[in-house]
Image (spheres, rainbow, N blue to C red):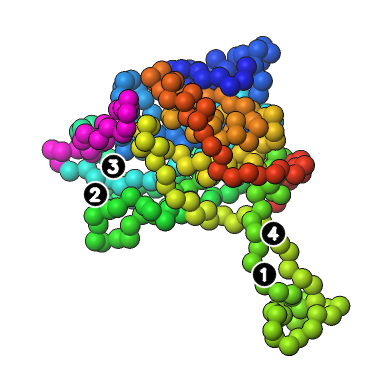
């Protein structure tokens, strides 16, 4: 079962997928790349039990741990989870509650959101204007649940959402957490290496650098710099909205290195929160297949259109991968 969309609550559809895997009907995905609904930011409409509308951060974390536990059950033994998650602020005001954005699907372009009051409960331990700390709450909870927490990657946004604040910096980053199912897991380091700047040659005897024009001549104690380097943990990627989707669109440039590092051609990529289908589109463009879950069947046509019309971010020639890394 490949290139399949499972409609409904992912807490149910992932259980169905696991049952199909254990009976041989479906294959195990090699990795999961996803960006779930963030806590308290918007109402996607439909079911009242949708993830993100919980009454407290703790309840949200509990639901997310449940979903990712189901994901873990479905992955191959060397599988990984690449999880994009953002934070939010506590903005309770007596008599007003926490305001949420109402999310709808437009047939032509993004609908303008309407404000809708959702919560009127005051949360113990949080003060108005507190940063809640959702990403790390979730990361630590997943680690406690058995995932190996391997890395926090910073998604730096050059064009962040404007904020009318004067008592703090404008928020311009989110997190991507790399987690693995087991101690040994698949990770293709070579596939996502970055171009290295020409630092000239390095003098290993005293740690100094030699650059062209300095008058120094390379000798046996000097070595040339390498053309590539390991990908760094801060990824600068611009937000690019997809006009026919909801505005919480997963940028393709953010997904591509995750898929290249976490899978080989022919593998299956899982996304339990498909949204506009960007993960599936990027997976197909890189020679992978996908399995996804989506709460709203209305998004089906949009997802398929996204996959059919998607143009790859870049042409990446993937070398034969290294197989498995030990945790160090």
Is residue 253 in view from this perspective?
A: yes
The reply to whether the C-beta atoms of the residues labelled 1 and 2 are less than 8 Å apart is no
Q: Which numbered dot is residue 228? A: 4
Tell me: 271 left or right of 318.
Answer: left
Q: Which residues are magenta?
A: 94-115
Q: What x and y, as percent, mark residue 192?
A: 65, 49
**Residue of label 3:** 124
Relative to the observer, which residue lies in front, 283 or 59? 283
CA separation, marks 4 and 3?
49 Å
Which of the two discs, 4 and 3, sits closer to the camera? 4
Relative to the observer, which residue lies in front, 315 or 148? 315
Question: Farthest residue toward the bottom?
Answer: 215
Instruction: Report the residue at 25% width, 57% height from top.
Output: 165
CA separation, marks 4 and 2?
46 Å
Q: Earlier in the sequence, mark 1 or mark 2?
A: 2
Q: Earlier in the sequence, mark 4 or mark 1?
A: 1
**Residue of label 1:** 198
């Amino acid at each position: 079962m490949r290139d399949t969309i499972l409609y409904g609550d992912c807490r149910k559809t992932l259980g169905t997928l696991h049952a199909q895997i254990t009976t041989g009907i479906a294959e195990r995905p090699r990795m999961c790349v996803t960006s779930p609904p963030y806590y308290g930011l918007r109402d996607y409409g439909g079911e009242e039990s949708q993830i993100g509308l919980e009454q407290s951060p703790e309840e949200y974390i509990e639901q997310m741990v449940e979903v990712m536990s189901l994901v873990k059950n479905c992955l191959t033994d060397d599988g990984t989870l690449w999880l994009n998650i953002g934070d939010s602020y506590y903005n309770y005001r007596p008599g007003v509650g926490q305001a949420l954005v109402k999310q709808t699907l437009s047939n032509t372009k993004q609908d303008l959101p309407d404000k809708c009051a959702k919560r009127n409960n005051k949360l113990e331990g949080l003060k108005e204007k507190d940063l809640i700390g959702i990403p790390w709450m979730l990361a630590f909870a997943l680690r406690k649940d058995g995932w190996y927490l391997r890395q926090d990657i910073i998604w730096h946004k050059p064009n962040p959402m404007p904020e009318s604040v004067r008592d703090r910096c404008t928020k311009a980053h989110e997190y991507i957490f790399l987690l693995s199912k087991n101690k040994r897991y698949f990770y293709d380091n070579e596939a996502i290496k970055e171009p290295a700047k020409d630092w000239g040659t390095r003098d290993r005897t005293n740690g100094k650098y030699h650059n062209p024009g300095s008058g120094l001549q390379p000798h046996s104690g000097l070595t040339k710099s390498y053309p590539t380097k390991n990908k760094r943990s801060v990824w600068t990627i611009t937000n690019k909205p997809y006009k026919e989707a909801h505005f919480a669109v997963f940028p393709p440039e953010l997904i591509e290195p995750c898929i290249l590092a976490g899978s080989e051609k022919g593998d299956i990529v899982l996304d339990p929160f498909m949204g506009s289908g960007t993960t599936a589109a990027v997976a197909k463009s890189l020679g992978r297949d996908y399995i996804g879950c989506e709460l709203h069947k209305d998004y089906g046509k949009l997802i398929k259109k996204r996959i059919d019309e998607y143009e790859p971010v870049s042409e990446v020639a993937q070398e034969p991968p290294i197989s498995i890394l030990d945790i160090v």
